[in-house]
């Protein structure tokens, strides 16, 4: 009996040895035979909102290298500055807010004129109340209307990005400010292991970093906490009590805090119906220096759309050609908005993985992997995330009044190949290749090549069943 | 006894834990103490030819990141378009053919004039029979003669490359069209795991992808198969029957099919004794745009050779300076052809791994690893593959009438260091370093430095024994 | 009992399976809860000096990708040329020497005029005694004085770098020549696995490469050893006896040999008080070609310092802007020298890991990881190495008369964020973010923002305790 058990355990270990060999020496994480719409796996509650974190160990996120987060900042909520070990691209899903941009080494260019009042005559105030780096407006209007006309457009749904810069965000509106952010842990902006490692400059995370092995039960503190108070006192030339206050030992408000009273940062007024200082920035020739580099772009202005059909919807892309800082981050984005009679023709990513997040409505999505197997065939709705690995073909079809999504891509100039439509692979192929390859008549082959003259969006005629097992 | 078994299994698991630690956390795949000439591990048979796939799990391929394939396309065989998750460089070893280039988004620039005949008046034909993207000629002449004179050269052995573009190939000659292709799974063109993942646009692979874990028994289908026929019908605006035909369910011809009847693609005539439209392309200034970017280069024209000695042979290199698209692919190539009295002086790759494939003849190759051990000392012949990792020194000596090879390198500007010869390390070193380092006289050191005035190729005087155990 | 043992072993293997899953599929090597000052783990003794190698398997080096070595070359010692599988940056810590630069393919530009004497009329000498590639002077003066004035500065502590080029080094002074070198195994200059793989061109290593699995007991030979002597004889056109001499079979002097008699390489005279041919190189416009590319830079000239305060010290950086070849190597460096009353304000690496090596004196260093935990709080002294991973905050404070260090960084343009000081994150943040984030008064927040007006260096007032357990 003992002998038997020994044999059993021996075979078990051998199995592990064998499995271990192939699995570890030759990682196989993109052998995806089934994909799921992903929901956040951890919610970090704070006083002024919450951060929802997707589990980057899930096979599809592991394969694609993405770390994904959603920020929900309540009115008067202030998201405290945090530094990341990877370049991050953020999209404003809902609400309005203020964003501070801090790139250390750049000058404080927003300077408040002297206010004759309480702060006068005090220690450090020398003729001004405060000066700091740039603060930008973030706005997002009514998401329910498809904007057709530029004049009517009052929305500003912004894609904003960070790398090393520490970005406080403040919700100055009456509705929650919702943002989603994607980071690529696999590119060389991340010089650590393939884990998301946020560094808190202020605040803390009492729940701990559940997504990191061995950090689950541990409170995550801000960087001041790790330094000795005397060191901080000397570095900042402050007294030890203030230094201890920076360590936020008694603070359990988390990383998004509630602001009491007014939030008086210096900022230029927001132009009505236009959205921020963008046109102004475009006007001067300085935007290529790092300190003034443009970091925000409104993706919801259909007049800037790359694909636009009034009856179907629009698609806008953001890459290193229209936002040069993306060359550093090695990320790009695509914003899509389609009506319920529209279909995005089947296509695949040539040189990137992408993470598709639904910001509004529902769609039926069908995805096919490298083996020709259908790996996703479901309805995806508001708030869900779906990864589209390189080379996987995907078809999107709106199933609600409107379907809107944002897609983050792991390449500063992500390319897409269409399977059908005027600029597709099939249209580019000689007729003879199609007749011989698919054993169809020249007439059918011509239809395959030339019937669909649209490039990306087409009409989808009525309901279809889905989610069925493949034939 | 039970206690014993428990201890046994405990030590076994500990062993695994330990082995696992070093092997997985710190991969050691380039600890190569012995190299082999590699043959394909899987042959995918198709109606019109076969694809031979090397096992990329073999230690040397795993270390270097290469995936390697050979395509044998019979006369009238058509290789159906396939998309890859990695940049690929292809070399025509034998035969002639036509290659279609499809870069989605680029215009169909090859347009057929109307033919008054069968296709007139039919559904989609509007004054033309077909239009498609560029089709190029591929030719390869007699491989047995070393070309000495440009006028006599009728061969075109082409190095052609792809990234995301889907390339159908057609053999319009009377002999098999043979191509070899290398992809670098380790560079960032591949955004998935380190496996070769071809995506079939037409055809299928009834044998399955044996080189992928869990895909061995499974038929690999084209991407249409995974979509619902109704989706395809809507996307292409065709009927459901044609859509089902695209899925090739009943088709077992594989990925290379036999064309019945003539293969009528539109293409410019091939110029005699010259080979294709290359000089014409060079003439215009448009080749830097992506759609017109030059993707083929004839490596077998000795008048373009980088190293050329009439009595010994020639060596041509292809890098991002002479073919700018290689900057995207991060690959380069070297073509060598030497006579049986010639030796390629010992050299090593500075910033790349290389995969050496023999296209003709035999050679004695000696290779030395980073530890100074001889890891290869054999004759290598036609059809065999040998990997030369970064820093490994290699000497090649023809042992047949002629020895020809193609070397793919994992860097767009691969550099080579020679051990001997006029541009070598030894010649660049001060005399005193050589006399002191090797304890030889100044006279001997001078001979070491200056005796061999050739740079790459030298005469090899007569037979030598090899394959012996090292002294 | 047997049943019990079976269950025990089963649970053990399950444990391994689980542990293996997370540990290997998702490497966690940057989960650093404690850092140590590292000493070399292996010393390779040679006739003319020694090479000390740090264990790159240590968690912090594994996380950061660094391989680190120290070379101690005795007077008249000659470090024989070696090729590396990774770009390497070297810093001269102590002593003076000569460095040969050999980039194969570049011309031998240092040519000796004919000497009418012993070598005349001999076989290969045709009117000159020797010609070779560039030889440069390396100097390092008294390390104990902080240089304040340029005129007084006679030191040359050089940061020199290599990629594929084989660099012999000769100590022509009376004191040991000490160099430290860092290579980044994680960037794409290394195309092999993440191990340091030096290839010896001359000499050997009788102790073997202890840092490589399976190479510990084995003598490491030079690359000539692996080739058959007849091959070498043919390649170099020398006789077989000389070829065997190149293999150094009987040689046990190691990789640093002692030169008997004078070491007569051709070189321009060293200018007094200036250090080498650098200004001359800067004068011509050719330095961007690879053969003449500047590869050395003196980091110890305070007149070139980036941060300089006479009473506190200076900091100089070396990146791809001032040394363009670093763009290829993807490395940069920082040289710091501070007095015992100075502190480097807390800061973190934005886009790089760094390896900090102490060249002189002692300092108290406090480091905080991404979780806000203090992971290092000790005195570090001369000869010790400390890794600072991306995003980890670090404070340095001199605890001896003088503290000098060199920091290697894994990015050609490494960026640093300061926590305190005029260009810091805190200064760039709006006042309201600080008052709300840390729950302090506007007065205190202003002090935090504006009290420290220095950028990098500040005064540190007297002794502090350290090494205590965190509160």
Image: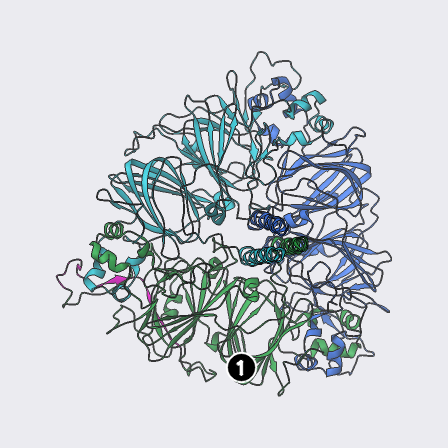
Chain colours: A cyan, B green, C blue
Q: Picture coordinates of residue C446 (x, y %)?
A: 63, 21
Residue C211 pos. (x, y %): 71, 58
Query: Where the C terminus of chain B falls, by quadrant?
Result: bottom right
Magenta region includes residue B139: yes
Judged left or right of residue B428, residue B404 is: left
Which part of the image, by quadrant, shows the N terminus of chain B? Answer: bottom right
Q: Is residue C369 above or below residue B429?
A: above
> For residue C124, what is the image quadrant?
bottom right
Res. C71 in view? yes
B145 vs A81, left or right, is left
B369 vs C180, nearest the viewer: B369
Q: Residue at x 28, y 33 (%)?
A: A149
Percent x, y of residue A56: 50, 43
- Dominant secondary-structure state across the stretch colored magenta: loop
Magenta part of the chain:
B120-141
Q: Identify the residue position indicated by label 1 in the image.
A: B362
């Amino acid at each position: 009996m003992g002998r038997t058990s020994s044999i059993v355990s021996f075979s078990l270990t051998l199995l592990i040895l064998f499995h271990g060999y192939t699995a570890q020496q030759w990682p196989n994480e993109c052998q995806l035979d089934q994909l799921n719409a992903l929901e956040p796996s951890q919610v970090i509650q704070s006083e002024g909102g919450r951060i929802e974190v997707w589990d980057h160990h899930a096979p599809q996120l592991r394969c694609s290298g993405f770390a994904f987060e959603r920020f929900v900042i309540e009115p008067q909520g202030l998201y405290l500055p945090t530094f990341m070990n990877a370049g991050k691209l953020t999209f404003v899903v809902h609400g309005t807010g203020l964003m501070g941009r801090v790139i250390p080494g750049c000058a404080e260019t927003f300077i408040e004129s002297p206010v004759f009042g309480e702060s006068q005559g005090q220690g450090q105030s020398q003729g001004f109340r405060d000066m700091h780096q740039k603060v930008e407006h973030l706005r997002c209007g009514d998401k329910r209307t498809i904007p057709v006309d530029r004049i009517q457009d009052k929305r500003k749904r912004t894609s904003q990005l960070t790398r090393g810069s520490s970005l406080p965000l403040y919700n100055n509106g009456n509705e929650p400010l919702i943002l989603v952010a994607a980071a690529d842990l696999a590119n060389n902006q991340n010089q650590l292991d393939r884990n998301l490692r946020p560094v808190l400059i202020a605040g803390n995370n009492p729940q701990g970093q559940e997504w990191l092995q061995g950090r689950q039960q541990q409170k995550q503190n801000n960087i001041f906490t790790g330094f000795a108070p005397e060191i901080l006192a000397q570095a900042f030339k402050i007294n030890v009590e203030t230094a201890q206050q920076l360590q936020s030992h008694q603070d359990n408000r988390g990383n998004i805090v509630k602001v009491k009273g007014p939030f008086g940062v210096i900022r230029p007024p927001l132009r009505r119906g236009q959205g921020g200082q963008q046109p102004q920035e475009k006007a001067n020739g300085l935007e290529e220096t790092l300190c003034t580099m443009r970091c925000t772009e409104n993706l919801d202005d259909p007049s800037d759309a790359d694909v636009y059909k009034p009856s179907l919807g629009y698609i806008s892309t953001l890459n290193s050609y229209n936002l040069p800082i993306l060359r550093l981050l090695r990320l790009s984005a695509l914003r899509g908005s389609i009506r319920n009679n529209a279909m995005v023709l089947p296509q695949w990513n040539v040189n990137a993985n992408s993470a598709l997040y639904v910001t509004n409505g529902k769609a039926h999505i069908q995805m096919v992997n490298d083996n020709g197997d259908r790996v996703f065939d479901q309805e995806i709705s508001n708030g869900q995330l779906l990864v589209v690995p390189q080379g996987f073909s995907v078809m999107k079809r709106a199933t609600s009044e409107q379907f809107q999504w944002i897609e983050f891509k792991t390449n500063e100039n992500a390319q897409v190949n269409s399977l059908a439509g005027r600029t597709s692979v099939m249209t580019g192929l000689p007729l003879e290749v199609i007749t011989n390859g698919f054993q169809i008549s020249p007439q059918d082959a011509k239809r395959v090549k030339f019937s669909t003259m649209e490039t990306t969006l087409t009409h989808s005629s009525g309901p279809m069943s889905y989610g069925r097992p493949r034939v």
